[in-house]
Amino acid sequence: MENKDTLKNSPPNRIYVARFLFFTRWLQLPLYLGLVLAQCVYVFHFWIELSDLIGAVMGNQTSLQHILDVVAIEGTSKPDKLTETTIMLVVLGLIDVVMISNLLIMVIIGGYETFVSRMNLEGHPDQPEWLSHVNASVLKVKLATAIIGISSIHLLKTFINASAYDAKTLIAQTGIHLAFLLSAIAIAYCDRLLTQSSQQSGDH
């Protein structure tokens, strides 16, 4: 109530500036639409890789060569046939695409809901559970968790082909993954402290 009275008592020019600045939040809309296009690219890439994998299993030589090129590591000899390890690497690549796609969905929907406009999805049967209590802090924690998952997939792909990498590369990738993990823990801890602080302020 006090905020509304303050706004009413403000000079007209200040009200117009405030409303204009608030309206500029819609400048983020093209960014989220761009991420939707990126999502479409990932969907196309996923189906190309999946169709090549199925074609390779069915004996299509063109699909097989594409799959072997995908899993080949620079500086090492390219695999000459479809093996369990090759299939596993391709499947991990598909999972990686799905996890990045999930990350895009969280950024698009959560960011739009938090920074642009409400979606008014209350009561919708397909409303994501996390969207009902999303805010900037929750979004940061969820994004950090998703990044850890993506990093885990990349690290697993490296360990499967550990013989093709030197020790420095393995240590560096493990260190980067641990850095992501520690960053996510720090973000979650800070978010918890802020939540507790706001609850204590509300109690007083």
Image: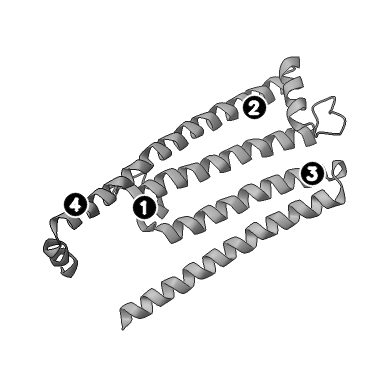
Residue of label 1: 114
Q: Quadrant of residue 63?
A: top right
Q: Residues within 10 Å of mark 3 (few under 14, many from 20)?
A: few
| Image location of residue 103, percent across then percent down | 52, 45
Residue tagged 3? 160
Amino acid at circle 4: Tyr
Cα–Cα span, label 4 and label 3 = 60 Å
Q: CA distance from mark 1 to mark 3?
A: 39 Å
Q: Is residue 160 visible?
A: yes
Of tags 1 and 2, which is closer to the observer? 1
Q: CA distance from mark 4 to mark 1?
A: 23 Å
Q: Quadrant of the N terminus?
A: bottom left
Real-space Cα separation, disc 2 to disc 3, in angstroms: 19 Å
**Labels 1 and 2: the sequence-earlier one:** 2
Mark 2 residue type: Glu
Which label sits in the foreground, 1 or 3? Answer: 1
Q: Earlier in the sequence, mark 2 or mark 3?
A: 2
How far is mark 2 from mark 4, CA to CA?
52 Å
- Comparing 75 with 44, the one in front is 75
Indicate the secondary structure of the residue bearing disc 4.
helix
Considering the image in quadrants, where does the C terminus appear?
bottom left
- Secondary structure found at label 2: helix
